[in-house]
Amino acid sequence: MSEYDGKQFVGIDLHRSRSVIVRMTAEGERLDAVRIVNDPMALMTEIGKAGEAPEVVLEATYGWYWAVDVLAGAGAR
């Protein structure tokens, strides 16, 4: 969990082997931006930093099913 305890919004740009994840406040302040290797545990770790039930936007053209399953399991909307 991040030190910021307000509502967080997460943007994910999902690519074939790596993805970029950006966490922001409701006011648009960037809290974090990371690049991960596409792996369910790596995604779960980053989403866990966004607190309970973060709002998530996922941009992907293919191969996104595994990521949606991880996000749903983490309580993301």
Image (cartoon, rainbow, N blue to C red):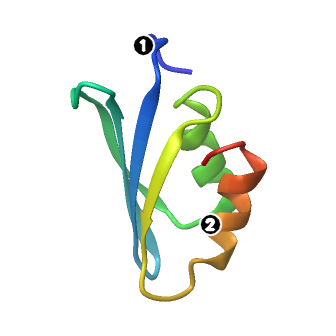
Between 58 and 21, the residue placed more toward the observer is 58
Which residue lies at the image location 64% right of the left edge and 28% below the top edge?
52
Judged left or right of residue 68, residue 69 is: right
Check disc 2: other Cα within 10 Å, few if <14, some if 14-19, many if 20+: some
The x and y percentages for residue 24 are 32, 33
Q: Earlier in the sequence, mark 1 or mark 2?
A: 1
Residue at 65% x, 47% y is 44
The N terminus appears in which quarter of the rendering? Answer: top right
Residue at coordinates 57% horizontally, 85% vertically from top-left? 63
Look at mark 2 in the image and give the residue it sits on: 67
Type of the residue with mark 1: Tyr
Q: Is residue 19 above or below residue 48?
A: below
Dot 1 surroundings within 10 Å: few (below 14), some, or many (20 or more)?
Answer: few
Q: Is residue 11 left or right of residue 62?
A: left
Q: Amino acid under label 2?
A: Ala
Question: Where is residue 65, by image quadrant?
Answer: bottom right
Do labels 1 and 2 touch, CB within 8 Å? Answer: no
Q: How far apart are marks 1 and 2 (CA)?
A: 24 Å
Q: Which mark is residue 4?
A: 1
**Furthest-bottom residue in this view:** 62
Per the image, label 2 sits on a secondary structure element best described as helix
Residue drawn 54% across and 30% down?
49
Residue 67 horizontal/vertical position (percent): 62, 66
Q: Where is residue 38 in the image (x, y as percent from the top left)?
A: 54, 67
Count how many numbered circles sit on residues in the image: 2
Q: In which quarter of the image is residue 32?
A: top left
Q: Is residue 41 above or below residue 45?
A: below
Q: Name the image quarter holding residue 31.
A: top left
